[in-house]
Amino acid sequence: MSGVIAGFTVIFLVVGIGLALGRAGTLGPTATEVLSRLVFFVCTPALLFHSLVTADLRDVFSSTLVIAGGTALTIGLLYAVIARLWLHRSPADLMIGALSSSYVNSVNLGVPIAMYVLDDRSFIAPLLLFQILLYSPIALTVLDITALPAGGRRVWRDAIVTPLTNPILLGGVAGLVVSGLHWHPPSALLDPFRMLGDASVPLALLVFGLSLSARRKGTSDDGEPRPTRDVALAAVLKMLAMPALAYAISRWGFGLSGHHLFAQVVIAALPTAQNVLVYAVRYQRGQAMARDAALVTTLASIPVIAVIAVVLG
């Protein structure tokens, strides 16, 4: 438990520094965007590549992949069914809501928590690969079909090209190939990836703090009414139902216990990813929903993960 407290202390302090820097404007108005791109395009792919090259592939294609993927798809489908019957939303809005309830923030918070709370970043690699390789293409295909006019649909191009141009996926696939070939690159080649990967976590936390400082309370830039019921449903499913389902599958489906059980539940309790808002903006559907769900689940994840740590840690 002391290790969990120490891990959260590290995370909160770095996020706090980012928040203070954002409020003071020390890094300028484009700091969030620039650092986010650095984390996404350089540091996180390097981290994933180095982690996979130096890891046992059995840790990647493991129960974590099945549990993380199964819980995400189940919760997303559950949201779609409930929101369709209760809120009568359109298919495109249902897709954004489903992502808001199940698509995990695996970079900005997932990687730091895996390193400082779980003390093992190998837990996050299967989740990253699942979301980028499978979940994102499914979501983009559905949104292309339901949100774009017939002349603007790019179903097959987006479903195939988008994941293949994702730098995190490319880093992961490259790492899997090198590891599968049982080739151990010399330090001169591997150390640059390690150095860049080590920068991913602190930069991601700083970006998260900077993004919190940039939020405007009570505003909706796109003019959408506040989707209170949609956000509440997504938040309850994301922060309560998803960890509970992960616990049930992990314990009774795979017989996990101890630290491995704790890790699966913590991964499921991570908040909604910022990627959902990117998709919502692109397709002009559910933007307020995606933005508010990310904020609510991020704030809720702190006490939820703390409770999980007390009960299972």
Image (spheres, helix red, strand yellow):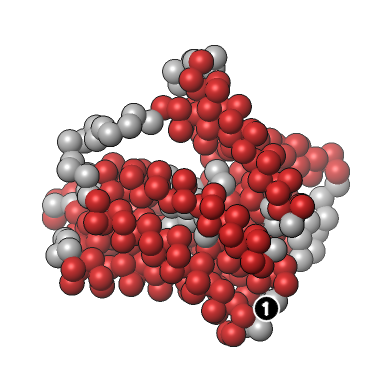
SS type, badge 1: loop
The residue closer to the viewer here, 239 or 275, is 239
Q: Residue at x 45, y 60 (%)?
A: 239
Image coords of residue 168 (percent x, y): 56, 48
Q: Is residue 12 left or right of residue 182?
A: left
Would you identify the image quadrant in which residue 256 lies? bottom right
Q: In the rendered view, tell whether residue 10 sits above or below residue 250.
A: above
Image quadrant of residue 179?
bottom right
User: Split into 4 quadrants, where in the image is the C terminus?
Assistant: bottom right
Residue name at image x 13 percent, y 52 percent:
149
Q: Residues within 10 Å of mark 1 (few under 14, many from 20)?
A: some
Q: Is residue 33 left or right of residue 96?
A: right
x then y, percent, for residue 185: 82, 50
The answer, for residue 50, to whether it is visible in the render is yes
Q: Position of residue 10 (x, y in %)?
A: 69, 39
At a point 70% along the width and 76% down the height, the residue shown is 257
Q: Residue at x 80, y 40 (%)?
A: 191
Q: Looking at the picture, does residue 8 appear above or below residue 239?
A: above
Please name whichever residue, 39 or 79, is drawn nearer the observer in this view of the structure.
79
Which residue is labeled 1 in the image? 256
